[in-house]
Image (cartoon, grey):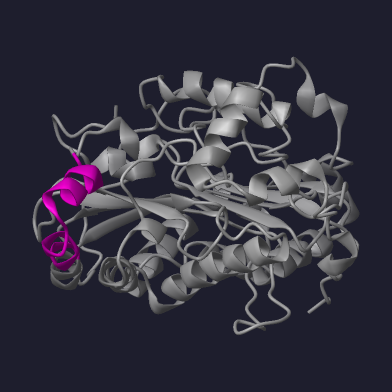
């Protein structure tokens, strides 16, 4: 695997006003300061666009605004629903009435869609882990561990620990730590009826919908800046590197003609991505950068781009499935196997596109998209670190289920719809 360049060459000046001011603030003071001062202005402007997008009725991501129906039938994923319900009830049993009221929401609540990935606590919903007693935090982690695959829980834990590491790195541990995440519970935990939960915070946002033994884990946002810990008790922790390496191998394996069609923009900073200045419709902003399906983009029309995977070799298809397997790692094992089988039914309608170079040292973006899955991978420029250009040590990934699959919307009955 190609070594990741060291992030330590890009450590910020911690004596700058940005860090000195934030150092004295709680997460709520930090968010209030952000709103009052509208700083950074690019993020404040984006949050105003997000507010408008949040009010739109849910449709789902499509290629042209039209939802393809019938893609997500009811089925048995074999999930250990009894263990999940037991963990959720144990969490509830340990709460006060006030905590329960804060944690729980109706099944058909708009708050399913309230997640966002910046460190600013834009919507202080549910329970924030860092404010809870240790038994409650343990109960939340038990729910996560019993819901996710072992690999998925390890991924979530690593993202939380890297967030903690970043907080220490820039002397903002009150803003970014392993417990600076909010959890919301929707519906009533049941082995038969629908329910679910949402966990969100900086660089980790995971939505889980359950009905019987069927599970939907989407949308998912996982990021890391940096994407590895090089000192301290969690030294050696690293995430989001394999899927980058495998995506690069797919691109490098294409013919010159295919590379030309796959690459939709030559440069990671391309003015054509910001055609209108409208943050609701342009395909680049400083937070999402090249991602098109991040927070509040639940109804975006994303046309297929790049090269069709239908004629890929078996080796190239295997790489696509390895990427999908890694990005879908939160799903319990059997559920993930079924999702991969379903993805494999749509090779002729699966597309792969690329932005940037494809040299071993190049930063890049790619997207894999079909009627039943949309996977995005992007190398970012610095937010807390000082690299102005995208770098391989700052990575964002997104998982979506197009055509109404997100939030389990396609599986919901009357009165259960996502608002």
Can I make out residue 111 in this image? yes
Please state which of residues 399 and 108 is positioned toward the viewer in this rendering.
108
> In the image, is residue 139 above or below residue 389?
below
Tag count: 0
Residue at the extreme front of the image, as rendered? 24
Q: In which quarter of the image is residue 225?
A: bottom right
**Pick the front one: 381 or 98:** 98
Res 95 → quadrant: bottom left
User: Vertical placement of 389 versus 303: above or below?
Assistant: below
In the image, taking residue 288 as reference, residue 210 lies left or right, namely: left
Residue 131: x %, y % from top left: 37, 57
7 to the left or right of 48? right
Q: Which x, y percent locates residue 193? A: 10, 51
Question: Which residue appears at 78% of the width and 46% of the height?
Answer: 262
Quadrant in the picture for the N terminus:
bottom right
Q: Which secondary structure dominates the residues rendered in magenta?
A: helix
The residue located at (62%, 36%) in the rendering is: 292
Q: Is residue 22 above or below residue 242?
A: above
Residue visible at 83% across and 25% down in the picture: 272
Q: Would residue 39 be counted in the magenta stretch?
A: no
Residue 381, given in percent of the width and then of the height, sits at: 80, 49
Locate the C terminus by quadrant: top left
Q: Residue at x 48, y 41 (%)?
A: 28
Q: Quick check: can you spot residue 404?
A: no
Magenta span of residues: 88-105
Q: Does residue 7 appear left or right of residue 399 in this picture?
A: right
Q: Where is residue 246 in the image (x, y as percent from the top left)?
A: 70, 68
């Amino acid at each position: 695997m190609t070594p990741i360049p060291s992030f330590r060459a890009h450590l910020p000046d911690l004596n700058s006003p940005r860090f000195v001011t934030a150092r004295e603030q709680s997460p709520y003071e930090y968010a209030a300061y952000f709103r009052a001062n509208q700083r950074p202005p690019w993020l404040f402007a984006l949050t105003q666009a997000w507010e408008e997008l949040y009010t739109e009725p849910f449709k789902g991501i499509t290629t042209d605004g039209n939802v393809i129906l019938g893609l997500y039938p009811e089925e048995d994923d074999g999930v250990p629903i009894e263990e999940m319900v037991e963990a959720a009830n144990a969490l509830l049993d340990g709460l006060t009435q006030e905590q329960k009221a804060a944690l729980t929401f109706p099944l058909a609540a708009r708050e399913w869609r309230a997640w966002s990935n910046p460190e600013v606590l834009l919507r202080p919903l549910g329970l924030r882990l860092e404010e809870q007693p240790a038994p409650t935090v343990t109960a939340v982690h038990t729910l996560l561990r019993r819901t996710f695959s072992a690999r998925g829980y390890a991924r979530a834990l690593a993202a939380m620990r890297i967030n903690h590491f970043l907080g220490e790195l820039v002397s903002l541990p009150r803003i970014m730590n392993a417990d600076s995440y909010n959890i919301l519970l929707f519906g009533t935990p049941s082995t038969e009826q629908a329910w679910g939960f949402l966990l969100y915070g900086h660089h980790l946002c995971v939505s889980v919908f359950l009905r019987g033994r069927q599970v939907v884990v989407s949308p998912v946002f996982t990021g890391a800046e940096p994407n590895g810990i090089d000192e301290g008790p969690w030294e050696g922790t690293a995430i989001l590197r394999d899927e980058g390496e495998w995506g690069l191998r797919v691109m490098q394996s294409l013919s010159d003609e295919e590379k030309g069609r796959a690459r939709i923009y030559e440069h990671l900073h391309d003015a054509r991505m910001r055609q209108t200045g409208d943050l609701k419709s342009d395909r680049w902003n400083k937070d999402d950068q090249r991602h098109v399906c991040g927070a509040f983009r639940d109804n975006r029309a994303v046309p297929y781009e790049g090269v069709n995977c239908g004629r890929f070799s078996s080796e190239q298809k295997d790489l696509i499935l390895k990427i999908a397997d890694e990005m879908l790692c939160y799903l319990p094992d059997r559920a993930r196997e079924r999702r991969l089988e379903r993805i494999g039914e749509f090779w002729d309608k699966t597309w792969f596109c690329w932005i940037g170079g494809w040299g071993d040292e190049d930063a890049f973006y790619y997207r894999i998209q079909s009627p039943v899955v949309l996977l995005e991978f992007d190398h970012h420029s610095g937010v807390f670190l000082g690299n102005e250009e995208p770098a391989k040590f700052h990575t964002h990934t997104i998982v979506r289920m197009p055509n109404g699959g997100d939030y389990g919307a396609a599986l919901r009955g009357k009165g259960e719809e996502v608002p």
